[in-house]
Image: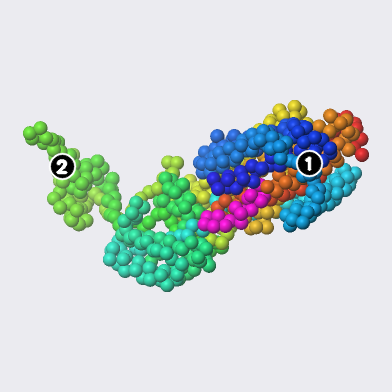
Amino acid sequence: MTLGGLALGVGMLVDNAIVVIENIYRLRGSGMGLYEAAIHGSEEVTAAIIAGTLTTLVVFIPTIFMRGMSGVMFKQLAYVVSFSLFCSLAVALTIVPMLSAKFLHPENAGHNTPPKKSLIQRAFTFSSRMVTMIEDDYRQLLRFSLNHWKLAVASTLTLLIGTLAIIPLLGVELMPSADEGEVRVNIEMEIGTRLKVADQKVKIIESIIKDAVPEAKNISTSIGGGWRSRGSHSGRIRISLVPIAERMRSSDAIAADLRGKLENIPGVKIRTRAGQGLFILRMGSSDNEEKLQIEIRGHDLATADILMEQIQGAIKHVEGITDVQVSREEGSPEELVMIDRLKAADMKCNVSQIADTLQTVLSGTGAGNYREAGDEYRILVKLGDAQGIGIDELLDLSVVNSDGESVILRNMVHTKTHQGPTRIERKNQERMVVVSANISGKDLGSILHDVREKLKSIPLPQDFSIHFAGDYEEQQKAFRELLLSFLLAIILVYMVMACQFESLRDPFVVMFSVPLAVIGVVLILFLTNTTFNIQAFIGCIMLAGIVVNNAILLVDHTNLLRRREKLPLKRAIEAACQHRLRPVLMTAATPILGLVPLAIGIGEGGEAQAPMARVVIGGLLSSTLITLILIPIIYALFERWKSNERML
């Protein structure tokens, strides 16, 4: 996130200086003296750039209340961008006017620099003429829009509604997938498999990997041991790949190819996936690293096992799901001793007597303490070699009843062979079992939709419930916090503008530029096949403070012309828009150009921050272009309703 903050900060750092210099140029071109232009030019835009800077800064205030993954990521971005904007504001209001008064010579004033033989000067002249042509076309388009404002508003609403219809087509996930240069292979065999046999199987798998993955830099293998080990029957292989610039395949493509080559090894369950660094964020709550996790909560273990098998079979064939597994391992064999209470009562024995006898025989019963020379030892009474006793020998033991008679244990109990669970997982004081899977080729939101459709056909037993966990659970938490932050950012932006304009109406007009950013955000996500995730959401929050800057410039200058030069409404709007066209275009272009490298996703892990850059670029493009037309219309409508002044 620091890299994203630097890219955005560099792009926004020059925005305030651009506005000041452009206004000084305009006044200097109208015949005003150099020093007077520097003073008056900076004074005219001081309120606007302060408001624009503060609206961008206040969107980061809600980060104070954010927790979890989104809070950690957003705070880094907030520090970098906030510091950049403070520096930009201070320089634009002090150093930039001073340098302009000292170095802007009369021959450089104005927008049309006389052509010279230098190639740079020719390029400058050409670009200046192009901007002049854009200004002429914009003036005509603005005049047409003001005269036909109903058509302009209807066209904008139609475009907005059409864009909103595309939203269901966008993918949704927690974080964008990034090529981390690693592939992981998890190996599992039958419980009780000897270490020597497991080692032989792993060597076969290693040989296949070496032939199938020429991009491997090194291969690390572990069997049995490790902090997440489940026994000698399991193993893990981590394949570190060469840098992405030195290979033709992504880590996902390598994992998919390797998955097909390892699926037919007998006696081994193999799960292959690309490296996912974010599993560390869920390490404390679950042993699963898979993105899709379905929790089955209920008390009865047998019913949970049946439901687990049904869900596993149902989702196995969903497109995009790979490596389905369950968290409950095969149970270990055990013998259940069932007491027949009626027979025990007839023989004058109670359940506690039988249970105490079995405990004494198998695990021992404390019979006091032995003290010697200041040391104390516990006395444990148990049957010698209790671990080697058979079930028949156990049942031949006797229990003394209440009459002091010995009763053979076999006469009061019967046994049942059973497989007991190796562990019982719990969450929120409920027993649970987890069906988990990796995803490949599709986003999490689309896969969850398909999984829900499959689960509708599975009857849910009484007292059982199904919950989605893993990335989906983290995504819901993060999105709730980000949505609250977005709403707080909107309110804070409006409050800042209300204080700056000393009006409630003008900030409301400016806020119309915020929904216009939705058009660009949705379109750029759709066209670039980018999912909506935490990074994209953070970009939307930042847009709430950035896109209003252009509208602030237009509204503030329109108010200035009407107040100082007493221009009629329409003439003031046209003059303000013409004067502020270049600053608006330039201040929008600088952050866009600064974020282009990040949006392309160049380099290792570049895909992780690309969604934020793409969202900001798309939102700025659509909001800037439409703001130049719609905000003057909205301003004119509000002013006309206020004072009954004719718009035309």
Instruction: Give the vertical position of 271 relative to 512 (above or below).
Output: below
Which residue, given by chain and number where applicable, does mark 1 sit on? 106
Q: Is residue 597 magenta?
A: yes
Is residue 131 visible in the rendered image? The answer is: no
Say what amino acid the circle numbered 1 marks. Answer: Pro
Say what amino acid the circle numbered 2 marks. Answer: Leu
Front label number (1 vs 2)? 1
Is residue 464 visible in the rendered image? The answer is: yes
The quadrant of the picture occupied by the C terminus is top right
Q: Which residues are magenta?
A: 591-606
Q: Estimate the x, y position of residue 307 in percent, counting from the top left.
A: 47, 55
For the point 24% across and 49% down, the residue is: 412
Given residues 352 and 647, the one toward you in this image is: 647
Q: Estimate the x, y position of residue 619 in percent, counting from the top left.
A: 69, 48
The CA distance from mark 1 to mark 2 is 104 Å
Q: Estimate the x, y position of residue 84 in percent, counting from the top left.
A: 60, 39
Element carrying mark 2 = strand
Which residue, given by chain and number where applicable, does mark 2 sit on? 380
Given residues 333 and 239, the one toward you in this image is: 239
Residue 141 badge? none
**Crowding near pointer 2: few (<14 within 10 Å), some, many (20+)?**
few
Given residues 589 and 424, the one toward you in this image is: 589
The quadrant where residue 632 appears: top right
Question: Majority secondary structure of the magenta segment?
Answer: helix
Instruction: Give the vertical position of 207 relative to 28 (above or below).
Output: below
Name the side, left or right, on which 414 lies relative to 111: left
